Image (cartoon, coloured by chain):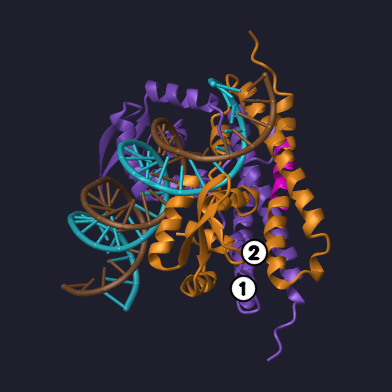
Chain colours: A orange, B purple, C brown, D cyan
Amino acid sequence: MALSHAIMTALIEDEMSGYELAKAFDASLGFFWHASHQQIYQELRKLADKGWLCQRRVSQRGKPDKQLYALTAAGRDVLDDWVFATSRVRESKDDLLVKLYNLSDNNLPHLRAELEARREHMMGRLFLYERIRRRHYADPDTLPLRRKGVYLALLAGIRHGEQYLAWCDESLRLLADVQSPVA
Amino acid sequence: MALSHAIMTALIEDEMSGYELAKAFDASLGFFWHASHQQIYQELRKLADKGWLCQRRVSQRGKPDKQLYALTAAGRDVLDDWVFATSRVRESKDDLLVKLYNLSDNNLPHLRAELEARREHMMGRLFLYERIRRRHYADPDTLPLRRKGVYLALLAGIRHGEQYLAWCDESLRLLADVQSPVA
DNA sequence: CTGCCTTATGCAAAACATTGCATATACGAA
DNA sequence: TTCGTATATGCAATGTTTTGCATAAGGCAG
Protein backbone atom coordinates (compact mmCIF):
# COMPACT_ATOMS: atom_id res chain seq x y z
CA MET A 1 0.00 0.00 0.00
CA ALA A 2 2.85 2.38 0.45
CA LEU A 3 6.07 1.08 -1.00
CA SER A 4 4.74 2.49 -4.24
CA HIS A 5 4.38 5.87 -2.59
CA ALA A 6 7.81 5.71 -1.06
CA ILE A 7 9.23 5.00 -4.51
CA MET A 8 7.33 7.85 -6.12
CA THR A 9 8.49 10.09 -3.30
CA ALA A 10 12.08 9.21 -4.09
CA LEU A 11 11.44 10.21 -7.70
CA ILE A 12 9.97 13.64 -6.94
CA GLU A 13 13.12 15.49 -7.91
CA ASP A 14 15.09 13.14 -10.13
CA GLU A 15 14.48 10.25 -12.45
CA MET A 16 16.30 7.12 -11.34
CA SER A 17 16.93 3.53 -12.27
CA GLY A 18 15.93 0.60 -10.08
CA TYR A 19 19.51 0.15 -9.06
CA GLU A 20 19.92 3.80 -8.09
CA LEU A 21 16.64 3.69 -6.23
CA ALA A 22 17.78 0.71 -4.24
CA LYS A 23 20.87 2.70 -3.25
CA ALA A 24 18.88 5.80 -2.47
CA PHE A 25 16.62 3.73 -0.27
CA ASP A 26 19.60 2.38 1.61
CA ALA A 27 20.84 5.92 2.18
CA SER A 28 17.72 7.85 3.07
CA LEU A 29 14.12 6.69 2.83
CA GLY A 30 15.24 3.18 3.63
CA PHE A 31 16.09 4.33 7.16
CA PHE A 32 12.40 3.96 7.85
CA TRP A 33 11.22 2.00 4.85
CA HIS A 34 13.35 -0.92 3.87
CA ALA A 35 12.90 -2.44 0.42
CA SER A 36 14.95 -5.06 -1.38
CA HIS A 37 15.95 -4.58 -5.00
CA GLN A 38 13.53 -7.30 -6.13
CA GLN A 39 10.67 -5.49 -4.53
CA ILE A 40 11.74 -2.23 -6.11
CA TYR A 41 12.05 -3.66 -9.62
CA GLN A 42 8.66 -5.34 -9.35
CA GLU A 43 7.01 -2.23 -8.02
CA LEU A 44 8.59 0.00 -10.65
CA ARG A 45 7.09 -2.11 -13.39
CA LYS A 46 3.66 -2.04 -11.78
CA LEU A 47 3.82 1.73 -11.41
CA ALA A 48 4.89 2.13 -15.02
CA ASP A 49 1.97 -0.12 -16.08
CA LYS A 50 -0.41 2.13 -14.21
CA GLY A 51 1.01 5.18 -15.93
CA TRP A 52 2.31 6.74 -12.74
CA LEU A 53 5.89 6.45 -13.88
CA CYS A 54 7.41 6.60 -17.32
CA GLN A 55 10.36 4.60 -18.42
CA ARG A 56 13.28 5.24 -20.72
CA ARG A 57 16.24 3.08 -21.57
CA VAL A 58 19.68 4.65 -21.36
CA SER A 59 22.89 3.18 -22.77
CA GLN A 60 26.06 3.68 -20.83
CA ARG A 61 29.71 3.26 -21.58
CA GLY A 62 31.35 0.41 -19.69
CA LYS A 63 28.14 -0.50 -17.87
CA PRO A 64 24.95 -2.33 -18.71
CA ASP A 65 21.99 -0.31 -19.96
CA LYS A 66 19.72 1.10 -17.32
CA GLN A 67 16.01 1.85 -17.20
CA LEU A 68 15.30 5.32 -15.88
CA TYR A 69 11.94 5.96 -14.28
CA ALA A 70 10.36 9.38 -13.83
CA LEU A 71 7.20 10.51 -12.11
CA THR A 72 4.37 11.37 -14.54
CA ALA A 73 1.73 14.04 -13.95
CA ALA A 74 -0.70 11.22 -13.07
CA GLY A 75 1.80 9.79 -10.60
CA ARG A 76 2.32 13.21 -9.10
CA ASP A 77 -1.45 13.50 -8.57
CA VAL A 78 -1.70 10.07 -6.95
CA LEU A 79 1.15 10.97 -4.63
CA ASP A 80 -0.39 14.31 -3.68
CA ASP A 81 -3.70 12.61 -2.88
CA TRP A 82 -1.99 9.94 -0.85
CA VAL A 83 -0.45 12.55 1.43
CA PHE A 84 -3.98 13.63 2.37
CA ALA A 85 -5.20 10.14 3.21
CA THR A 86 -5.04 9.48 6.94
CA SER A 87 -2.45 6.86 7.75
CA ARG A 88 -2.61 4.57 10.68
CA VAL A 89 0.23 3.84 13.05
CA ARG A 90 2.03 0.59 12.50
CA GLU A 91 3.67 -1.16 15.39
CA SER A 92 7.32 -1.86 14.91
CA LYS A 93 7.43 -5.68 15.27
CA ASP A 94 10.73 -6.14 17.00
CA ASP A 95 11.65 -9.79 17.58
CA LEU A 96 13.80 -8.85 20.51
CA LEU A 97 10.86 -7.53 22.51
CA VAL A 98 8.98 -10.78 22.00
CA LYS A 99 12.08 -12.69 22.97
CA LEU A 100 12.29 -10.73 26.20
CA TYR A 101 8.95 -12.24 27.19
CA ASN A 102 10.85 -15.53 27.20
CA LEU A 103 13.67 -14.36 29.44
CA SER A 104 15.10 -17.14 31.60
CA ASP A 105 18.36 -18.07 33.33
CA ASN A 106 19.09 -20.17 30.30
CA ASN A 107 18.86 -17.49 27.63
CA LEU A 108 19.87 -14.50 29.74
CA PRO A 109 23.45 -14.36 28.41
CA HIS A 110 22.23 -14.58 24.86
CA LEU A 111 19.65 -11.83 25.29
CA ARG A 112 22.23 -9.64 26.96
CA ALA A 113 24.43 -10.20 23.92
CA GLU A 114 21.57 -9.28 21.61
CA LEU A 115 21.00 -6.09 23.57
CA GLU A 116 24.69 -5.25 23.23
CA ALA A 117 24.50 -5.92 19.51
CA ARG A 118 21.49 -3.66 19.14
CA ARG A 119 23.33 -1.02 21.06
CA GLU A 120 26.32 -1.22 18.71
CA HIS A 121 24.12 -1.27 15.65
CA MET A 122 22.14 1.76 16.75
CA MET A 123 25.29 3.61 17.67
CA GLY A 124 26.60 3.22 14.13
CA ARG A 125 23.28 4.30 12.76
CA LEU A 126 23.31 7.39 14.94
CA PHE A 127 26.77 8.42 13.80
CA LEU A 128 25.51 8.24 10.23
CA TYR A 129 22.37 10.25 11.00
CA GLU A 130 24.34 12.88 12.83
CA ARG A 131 26.79 13.23 9.97
CA ILE A 132 23.92 13.78 7.57
CA ARG A 133 22.34 16.26 9.93
CA ARG A 134 25.49 18.29 10.37
CA ARG A 135 26.21 18.32 6.67
CA HIS A 136 22.75 19.10 5.29
CA TYR A 137 20.46 20.26 8.04
CA ALA A 138 22.59 22.32 10.37
CA ASP A 139 20.09 25.17 10.50
CA PRO A 140 16.58 23.72 10.13
CA ASP A 141 14.69 27.01 10.43
CA THR A 142 16.17 28.39 7.23
CA LEU A 143 15.43 25.33 5.10
CA PRO A 144 12.88 25.48 2.31
CA LEU A 145 9.63 23.80 3.29
CA ARG A 146 10.08 20.43 1.65
CA ARG A 147 13.56 20.05 3.13
CA LYS A 148 12.09 20.79 6.53
CA GLY A 149 9.92 17.71 6.08
CA VAL A 150 12.92 15.59 5.19
CA TYR A 151 14.74 17.01 8.18
CA LEU A 152 11.90 16.06 10.49
CA ALA A 153 12.00 12.50 9.20
CA LEU A 154 15.72 12.40 9.89
CA LEU A 155 15.12 13.88 13.31
CA ALA A 156 12.61 11.13 14.03
CA GLY A 157 15.37 8.64 13.24
CA ILE A 158 17.82 10.44 15.48
CA ARG A 159 15.45 10.76 18.42
CA HIS A 160 14.39 7.17 18.06
CA GLY A 161 17.99 6.06 17.95
CA GLU A 162 18.94 8.02 21.04
CA GLN A 163 16.01 6.65 22.94
CA TYR A 164 16.72 3.09 21.81
CA LEU A 165 20.31 3.39 22.91
CA ALA A 166 19.22 4.64 26.32
CA TRP A 167 16.76 1.76 26.57
CA CYS A 168 19.47 -0.76 25.76
CA ASP A 169 21.64 0.69 28.50
CA GLU A 170 18.83 0.68 30.99
CA SER A 171 17.98 -2.92 30.08
CA LEU A 172 21.56 -4.08 30.37
CA ARG A 173 21.78 -2.37 33.74
CA LEU A 174 18.68 -4.16 35.03
CA LEU A 175 19.96 -7.49 33.77
CA ALA A 176 23.56 -6.91 34.86
CA ASP A 177 23.34 -7.86 38.49
CA VAL A 178 21.06 -10.84 38.02
CA GLN A 179 22.65 -13.82 39.73
CA SER A 180 23.62 -16.76 37.61
CA PRO A 181 21.74 -19.84 38.76
CA VAL A 182 23.68 -21.74 41.42
CA ALA A 183 25.24 -24.82 39.90
CA MET B 1 8.56 -15.87 10.58
CA ALA B 2 7.78 -14.66 14.04
CA LEU B 3 4.07 -14.27 14.51
CA SER B 4 4.15 -17.96 15.32
CA HIS B 5 6.70 -17.31 18.03
CA ALA B 6 4.75 -14.40 19.42
CA ILE B 7 1.71 -16.65 19.66
CA MET B 8 3.64 -19.41 21.37
CA THR B 9 5.09 -16.84 23.72
CA ALA B 10 1.58 -15.75 24.67
CA LEU B 11 0.80 -19.39 25.47
CA ILE B 12 3.78 -20.00 27.77
CA GLU B 13 1.73 -19.76 30.92
CA ASP B 14 -1.88 -20.38 29.90
CA GLU B 15 -3.78 -22.20 27.22
CA MET B 16 -6.02 -19.85 25.24
CA SER B 17 -8.51 -19.78 22.41
CA GLY B 18 -7.97 -17.79 19.24
CA TYR B 19 -10.39 -15.22 20.44
CA GLU B 20 -8.70 -14.83 23.80
CA LEU B 21 -5.33 -14.63 22.08
CA ALA B 22 -6.54 -11.85 19.87
CA LYS B 23 -7.58 -9.95 22.99
CA ALA B 24 -4.34 -10.71 24.77
CA PHE B 25 -2.44 -9.42 21.78
CA ASP B 26 -4.41 -6.21 21.90
CA ALA B 27 -3.55 -5.78 25.54
CA SER B 28 0.10 -6.74 25.74
CA LEU B 29 2.23 -8.33 23.03
CA GLY B 30 0.19 -6.50 20.44
CA PHE B 31 1.73 -3.24 21.63
CA PHE B 32 4.70 -4.19 19.50
CA TRP B 33 3.32 -7.03 17.43
CA HIS B 34 -0.07 -6.41 15.95
CA ALA B 35 -2.00 -9.38 14.60
CA SER B 36 -5.57 -9.57 13.33
CA HIS B 37 -7.84 -12.40 14.36
CA GLN B 38 -7.69 -13.95 10.89
CA GLN B 39 -3.94 -14.15 11.12
CA ILE B 40 -4.12 -15.66 14.57
CA TYR B 41 -6.64 -18.34 13.62
CA GLN B 42 -4.64 -19.30 10.56
CA GLU B 43 -1.41 -19.42 12.48
CA LEU B 44 -2.90 -21.44 15.32
CA ARG B 45 -4.00 -24.14 12.94
CA LYS B 46 -0.58 -24.26 11.30
CA LEU B 47 1.12 -24.53 14.67
CA ALA B 48 -1.24 -27.31 15.74
CA ASP B 49 -0.51 -29.15 12.47
CA LYS B 50 3.18 -28.97 13.19
CA GLY B 51 2.61 -30.37 16.67
CA TRP B 52 3.83 -27.27 18.44
CA LEU B 53 0.43 -26.62 19.96
CA CYS B 54 -2.30 -28.99 21.00
CA GLN B 55 -5.93 -28.28 20.69
CA ARG B 56 -9.00 -29.11 22.75
CA ARG B 57 -12.61 -28.13 22.24
CA VAL B 58 -14.47 -26.71 25.21
CA SER B 59 -18.22 -26.25 25.47
CA GLN B 60 -19.49 -23.21 27.27
CA ARG B 61 -22.84 -22.20 28.65
CA GLY B 62 -24.47 -19.35 26.75
CA LYS B 63 -21.54 -18.99 24.36
CA PRO B 64 -20.27 -20.82 21.31
CA ASP B 65 -17.70 -23.58 21.79
CA LYS B 66 -14.09 -22.54 21.85
CA GLN B 67 -10.85 -24.19 20.80
CA LEU B 68 -8.21 -23.97 23.44
CA TYR B 69 -4.60 -24.17 22.36
CA ALA B 70 -1.69 -25.08 24.61
CA LEU B 71 2.04 -25.20 24.03
CA THR B 72 3.42 -28.75 23.62
CA ALA B 73 6.88 -29.86 24.68
CA ALA B 74 7.91 -29.68 21.03
CA GLY B 75 6.56 -26.15 20.77
CA ARG B 76 8.39 -25.20 23.92
CA ASP B 77 11.63 -26.48 22.38
CA VAL B 78 11.08 -24.57 19.15
CA LEU B 79 10.41 -21.42 21.11
CA ASP B 80 13.52 -21.87 23.25
CA ASP B 81 15.64 -22.35 20.16
CA TRP B 82 14.13 -19.33 18.47
CA VAL B 83 15.21 -17.10 21.32
CA PHE B 84 18.80 -18.05 20.54
CA ALA B 85 18.56 -17.24 16.85
CA THR B 86 19.92 -13.79 16.11
CA SER B 87 17.18 -11.48 14.99
CA ARG B 88 17.65 -8.60 12.66
CA VAL B 89 16.29 -5.12 13.20
CA ARG B 90 13.22 -4.22 11.22
CA GLU B 91 12.61 -0.64 10.28
CA SER B 92 9.30 0.70 11.42
CA LYS B 93 7.69 1.73 8.11
CA ASP B 94 5.80 4.81 9.17
CA ASP B 95 3.74 6.39 6.38
CA LEU B 96 3.93 9.75 8.05
CA LEU B 97 7.71 9.96 7.67
CA VAL B 98 7.44 9.25 3.96
CA LYS B 99 4.69 11.83 3.70
CA LEU B 100 6.94 14.41 5.31
CA TYR B 101 9.28 14.05 2.33
CA ASN B 102 6.36 15.49 0.34
CA LEU B 103 5.83 18.51 2.57
CA SER B 104 4.51 21.53 0.66
CA ASP B 105 2.45 24.65 1.27
CA ASN B 106 -0.49 22.70 -0.01
CA ASN B 107 -0.37 19.78 2.41
CA LEU B 108 1.20 21.57 5.36
CA PRO B 109 -2.08 21.99 7.29
CA HIS B 110 -2.94 18.36 6.75
CA LEU B 111 0.43 17.10 7.90
CA ARG B 112 0.25 19.35 10.94
CA ALA B 113 -3.10 17.75 11.70
CA GLU B 114 -1.62 14.29 11.30
CA LEU B 115 1.17 15.20 13.70
CA GLU B 116 -1.41 16.41 16.21
CA ALA B 117 -3.33 13.17 15.78
CA ARG B 118 -0.22 11.10 16.37
CA ARG B 119 0.48 13.16 19.42
CA GLU B 120 -2.97 12.46 20.85
CA HIS B 121 -2.80 8.81 19.97
CA MET B 122 0.57 8.34 21.59
CA MET B 123 -0.53 10.25 24.67
CA GLY B 124 -3.39 7.80 25.17
CA ARG B 125 -1.04 4.91 24.65
CA LEU B 126 1.37 6.28 27.22
CA PHE B 127 -1.34 6.65 29.83
CA LEU B 128 -2.17 3.00 29.31
CA TYR B 129 1.48 1.90 29.53
CA GLU B 130 2.05 3.94 32.66
CA ARG B 131 -1.02 2.46 34.32
CA ILE B 132 0.25 -1.03 33.60
CA ARG B 133 3.67 -0.10 34.84
CA ARG B 134 2.42 1.33 38.10
CA ARG B 135 0.13 -1.61 38.70
CA HIS B 136 2.44 -4.48 37.84
CA TYR B 137 6.00 -3.31 37.57
CA ALA B 138 6.41 -0.69 40.27
CA ASP B 139 9.65 -2.20 41.54
CA PRO B 140 11.48 -3.82 38.63
CA ASP B 141 14.52 -4.99 40.59
CA THR B 142 12.50 -7.38 42.71
CA LEU B 143 10.67 -9.03 39.83
CA PRO B 144 11.32 -12.65 38.92
CA LEU B 145 13.49 -12.95 35.85
CA ARG B 146 10.86 -13.57 33.20
CA ARG B 147 8.77 -10.66 34.45
CA LYS B 148 11.83 -8.47 34.15
CA GLY B 149 11.88 -9.29 30.46
CA VAL B 150 8.24 -8.36 30.09
CA TYR B 151 8.93 -5.18 32.00
CA LEU B 152 11.75 -4.26 29.65
CA ALA B 153 9.46 -4.71 26.67
CA LEU B 154 6.94 -2.43 28.31
CA LEU B 155 9.69 0.04 29.09
CA ALA B 156 10.69 0.04 25.43
CA GLY B 157 7.12 1.02 24.62
CA ILE B 158 7.13 3.76 27.22
CA ARG B 159 10.47 5.21 26.17
CA HIS B 160 9.50 5.06 22.54
CA GLY B 161 6.21 6.78 23.29
CA GLU B 162 7.86 9.56 25.26
CA GLN B 163 10.37 10.15 22.53
CA TYR B 164 7.71 10.10 19.84
CA LEU B 165 5.64 12.63 21.73
CA ALA B 166 8.64 14.92 22.07
CA TRP B 167 9.33 14.54 18.35
CA CYS B 168 5.75 15.49 17.50
CA ASP B 169 6.08 18.61 19.62
CA GLU B 170 9.40 19.53 18.09
CA SER B 171 7.98 18.99 14.60
CA LEU B 172 4.89 21.05 15.27
CA ARG B 173 7.10 23.80 16.63
CA LEU B 174 9.27 23.85 13.51
CA LEU B 175 6.20 23.91 11.30
CA ALA B 176 4.27 26.37 13.43
CA ASP B 177 5.72 29.63 12.23
CA VAL B 178 5.88 28.70 8.58
CA GLN B 179 4.12 31.43 6.63
CA SER B 180 1.02 30.48 4.70
CA PRO B 181 1.57 31.18 1.02
CA VAL B 182 0.44 34.68 0.08
CA ALA B 183 -2.87 34.57 -1.75
C1' DC C 1 -39.51 -9.21 18.47
C1' DT C 2 -36.19 -6.54 16.06
C1' DG C 3 -31.85 -4.85 15.76
C1' DC C 4 -27.27 -4.34 17.61
C1' DC C 5 -23.28 -5.94 20.37
C1' DT C 6 -20.18 -9.51 22.06
C1' DT C 7 -18.38 -14.01 21.74
C1' DA C 8 -16.37 -17.33 18.61
C1' DT C 9 -14.48 -19.15 14.26
C1' DG C 10 -13.41 -19.35 9.66
C1' DC C 11 -12.69 -19.01 3.98
C1' DA C 12 -10.90 -16.84 -0.17
C1' DA C 13 -8.49 -13.62 -2.64
C1' DA C 14 -5.37 -10.14 -3.10
C1' DA C 15 -1.45 -7.53 -1.83
C1' DC C 16 2.92 -7.35 -0.08
C1' DA C 17 7.61 -9.19 1.16
C1' DT C 18 11.41 -12.51 1.26
C1' DT C 19 14.53 -16.00 -0.49
C1' DG C 20 17.15 -18.11 -3.77
C1' DC C 21 18.67 -18.17 -8.12
C1' DA C 22 20.22 -16.34 -12.78
C1' DT C 23 22.35 -13.33 -16.16
C1' DA C 24 25.66 -9.94 -18.13
C1' DT C 25 29.33 -6.34 -18.53
C1' DA C 26 33.44 -4.06 -16.84
C1' DC C 27 37.20 -2.94 -13.67
C1' DG C 28 40.96 -3.79 -10.72
C1' DA C 29 43.82 -6.88 -7.98
C1' DA C 30 46.50 -11.09 -7.36
C1' DT D 1 43.74 -14.95 -16.35
C1' DT D 2 40.98 -15.81 -12.76
C1' DC D 3 38.65 -13.95 -8.83
C1' DG D 4 36.10 -10.64 -6.50
C1' DT D 5 33.39 -6.45 -6.67
C1' DA D 6 30.28 -3.09 -8.60
C1' DT D 7 26.80 -2.14 -11.96
C1' DA D 8 22.34 -3.52 -13.71
C1' DT D 9 18.05 -6.33 -14.11
C1' DG D 10 15.07 -9.93 -13.51
C1' DC D 11 12.16 -14.75 -12.58
C1' DA D 12 9.94 -18.11 -9.65
C1' DA D 13 8.48 -19.85 -5.50
C1' DT D 14 7.24 -19.23 -1.10
C1' DG D 15 5.72 -16.89 2.93
C1' DT D 16 3.28 -13.19 5.37
C1' DT D 17 -0.30 -9.86 5.94
C1' DT D 18 -4.42 -7.55 4.80
C1' DT D 19 -9.15 -7.10 3.21
C1' DG D 20 -13.60 -8.49 2.70
C1' DC D 21 -16.95 -11.59 3.55
C1' DA D 22 -19.63 -15.30 6.16
C1' DT D 23 -21.60 -17.85 9.94
C1' DA D 24 -23.85 -18.58 14.40
C1' DA D 25 -25.39 -18.25 19.28
C1' DG D 26 -26.72 -15.44 23.24
C1' DG D 27 -27.69 -11.04 25.69
C1' DC D 28 -29.65 -6.61 26.06
C1' DA D 29 -32.17 -2.38 24.82
C1' DG D 30 -35.98 -0.25 22.76
Residue B142 visible in the picture? no
Please report contact status of discs 2 and 1: CB closer than 8 Å, yes or no. no
Provide residue A132's location: percent of width, then percent of height. 76, 52
Point 71% across, 72% down: residue: A145
Name the residue furthest bottom: B183
Q: Position of residue A98 (x, y in %)?
A: 53, 37
User: Which residue appears farthest toward the top when viewing the image?
Assistant: A183
Q: Chain of mark 2?
A: B
At mark 1, the secondary structure is helix
A116 and A4: which is toward the camera: A4
What residue is rendered at 73% in x and 51% in y? A158
Q: Residues within 10 Å of mark 2 (few under 14, many from 20)?
A: many
Residue positioned 36% across, 31% down in the render: B70
Label 1 crowd (10 A; few <14 / some 14-19 / many >=20): some
Q: Judge by depth and name the residue closer to the eye, B2 or A2.
A: A2
Residue with the mark numbered 2: B119
Q: Secondary structure at mark 2?
A: helix
Q: Chain of mark 1?
A: B
The residue closer to the viewer here, C16 or B137, is: C16
Where is B66 relative to A105, above or below? Answer: below
Q: Please provide the residue range marked out in magenta.
A: A159-168
Mark pair 2, 1: CA separation: 10 Å
Three-letter amino acid code of the residue under disc 1: Ala
The residue identified by callout 1 is B113
Which amino acid, by three-letter code, is at mark 2?
Arg
Q: Position of residue D23 (x, y in %)?
A: 18, 56
- For residue A138, above or below residue B175: above
Residue A163 included in the magenta stretch of the image: yes
> Of residues D24 and B34, which is closer to you in this image?
B34
The kind of secondary structure the magenta stretch mainly shows is helix
Tell which tag, 2 or 1, sits nearer the viewer: 1
